[in-house]
Amino acid sequence: MVTTLVPESEALLLEKARAEGITTGRERWLAMSPQCGFGELGTCCRMCYMGPCRIDPFGDGPQTGICGASPDTIVARNLLRECVGGAASHVGHARHVLLTLRDALEGKAPYEIRDEGKLFALAARLGLETDGRPAKEVARELVDLALEDFGRQNGKLHNWMRARAPAKELAMWEELGLAFSNPHNEIETAMHRTSMGNDADPASLLMATLRMGLVDGYAGLTLATDLQDVLFGTPQVRRVEANMGVLEENSVNLAVHGHNPVLSEKVLEWAVKLEDEAKAAGAERINVVGVCCTGNELTMRHGVPMAAHNLQSELILLTGAVDAMVVDVQCIWPQAASLAGCYDTAFITTDEMVRIPGATHIEFEPRHADERAQAIVRAAIEAFKKRKGKPVHIPNVKSVGLAGLSVETIVEILSKVNPDDPLKPVIDNIVSGKIFGAAGFAGCPSLKFRDTAMTERMVKALLRENVLVVTTGCTAHICAQAGFLTSAATEEYCGEGLKAVLTAVGEAAGLGAPLPPVWHMGSCVDNSRIVDLLAALAAKLDVKIGQLPVAGSAPELVQEKAISIGSWLLALGLMVHVAPAPRILGSPVVTQVLTHDLEEITGGRAYVEYNPEKAAAGIVAHIAKKREALGI
Ligand code: NFS
Ligand code: SF4
């Protein structure tokens, strides 16, 4: 019997759903169980219409597909296609931000450069002349370099990767044939490669998977984060609130959900500008709250409350207090639109590519951003008028915490300890063992692991062992809700060494309290910030990232995007913990390579463990091994 830890706030809303005859993901998941074993093992092939083919894992039935494809081929092809799905999402996101910046520079979209410092720093890394030049001129050249990456057909190295990848790793990737030129070519080739009758060699398919991880890393995550900082500003530390209790009964509650700050920044801007209209409608104010990653974007840059992670995107609607949920791309459950229809909630889709039955569509393109954002905010005010005076069920729970820890802010905080060499105190404390190591927690909340609090228990177990934790994505929401982004968490959960370091840094930085033990570094695209931080530490020690005493974890894997981000981390040489197992176990070769042999090639290794305490212990053991190899 597993002890379930459904938070009280969620339990009440789930009960409300049952009473109202509404199903949530939980019921749909139970109805789906047991889930298909062939699917879980990755040995179901649908690449052609002689199939679908599936491999009998017990050895009695077919051991190859009708065309003779082995389970290794089938699994490796499926994995690469998952990776393509993830990379395409992030590359699409980054390209959208890029085109917005281009349009803004041409005076065609109402956005401006908010962070010239970041622009000039990036431009310098890309080899552009910056001295004494106007920001706009430099930005135009920066945009051209990024656009060139999407059109190049001469096979030359991707500009952004060349400028942003750590040198030692880039050299390794070029040697291994993992460097890429044009992300769109890679995505096309991967789909071509995996279609019926092409690549059947698991080794070559796995290399393509790692290369797709790099496409995600540099043409997706890094490009998106870099340009978002230029357009919207580099995040600064701020105090934020989290959980569904941030909704306000008497305000217009406008939830932004999805990923792209090009939309949510404008919605926030107009929510402030149109506040008087909300007041005229009888509301106290307009309360913009964040769901999932676009929530993290606004949290990091403006301190907007983090209302809900992905799994709570249904629950928050059950409160009846959300006047509008406006969504852009990725992680949006179609069910949310139907659920919104049970209340006075306006469910608004905005991207031409994301249409959901039951939703109101207000197409949002950057060129008409102001006009469309006003329409969205006004739709929320109209919905509030209908909802006003009706009972709502806002759970009385919220937590507080610090967010906004971009690499720039972390360096700024550390420079209070050592102005000349900000990273030195971290390195010294790693060497002394006070900080045993660090772990990056990214990804989603999964129904399969929420009730046993997989993420929270892993984080607690690691902090006890003096492992510092950084986090992004919906995992950051989980950590915020658990109270991990606070000074109190340092006192409560950290081992003595880590506690001492965080206390000293907190004092030096003028917080008057310890620094939190879990650092909120942003959205899922902001995993690029984590890699930047690791790259800076590795460069200082003159080692590869894979030699550092660190590991990554997607403790509650849901999305294909986690597969592509994970592939980037594996290419970088990191150990990546994941649960549940990726769909590879039906292939002895793929399983062996990803969990063992890869360590000899890039240094990376996938590690599957479903038990939170054991998973944390596995990470600690890995960190210990890395420390030993470094002689510390
Ligand atoms: Ni990341 Fe963000 Fe959340 Fe998971 Fe979805 S919002 S991009 S995929 S569910 S963390
Ligand atoms: Fe079956 Fe081969 Fe077709 Fe896949 S490609 S469905 S294994 S025949």
Image (tube, grey):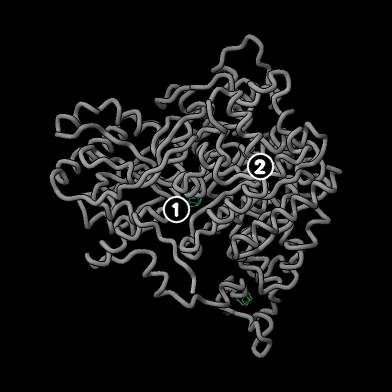
**Residue for point 21% across, 32% down:** 284
Q: Tally the numbered discs.
A: 2
Query: Which residue is found at the position 66% from the left and 55% from the top?
Result: 189
| Residue 248 screen position, x and y as percent | 26, 40
Q: Is residue 260 above or below residue 415?
A: below
- Tell me the residue that label 2 is attached to: 496
Residue annotated with mark 1: 331
Q: Position of residue 315 (x, y in %)?
A: 33, 55
Q: CA distance from mark 2 to mark 1?
A: 39 Å
Residue 289 location, quadrant:
top left
Q: Amino acid at mark 2?
A: Glu
Where 252 falls versus 320 (above or below)? above
Q: Is residue 145 left or right of residue 367?
A: right
SS type, badge 2: helix
Residue 520 point in image, percent of width and height: 53, 39
Q: In which quadrant is the C terminus drawn?
A: top right
Q: In this image, 524 relative to 62: left or right?
A: left
Q: Residues within 10 Å of mark 1 (few under 14, many from 20)?
A: some
In the image, is the residue at mark 1 within 8 Å of ligand 1 by its beta carbon? Answer: yes
- Asked which secondary structure carries label 1, the reply is loop
Callout 1, which amino acid? Cys
**Image check: 187 left or right of 334?**
right
Residue 293 in view, yes or no: yes
Q: Does residue 123 appear anywhere in the picture?
A: no
First in sequence: mark 2 or mark 1? 1
Looking at the picture, how far across and down is residue 320, in whole percent?
23, 51
Task: Respond yes or no on whether mark 2 lies under 8 Å from ligand 1.
Answer: no
Instruction: Spot the residue most to the bottom.
Output: 60
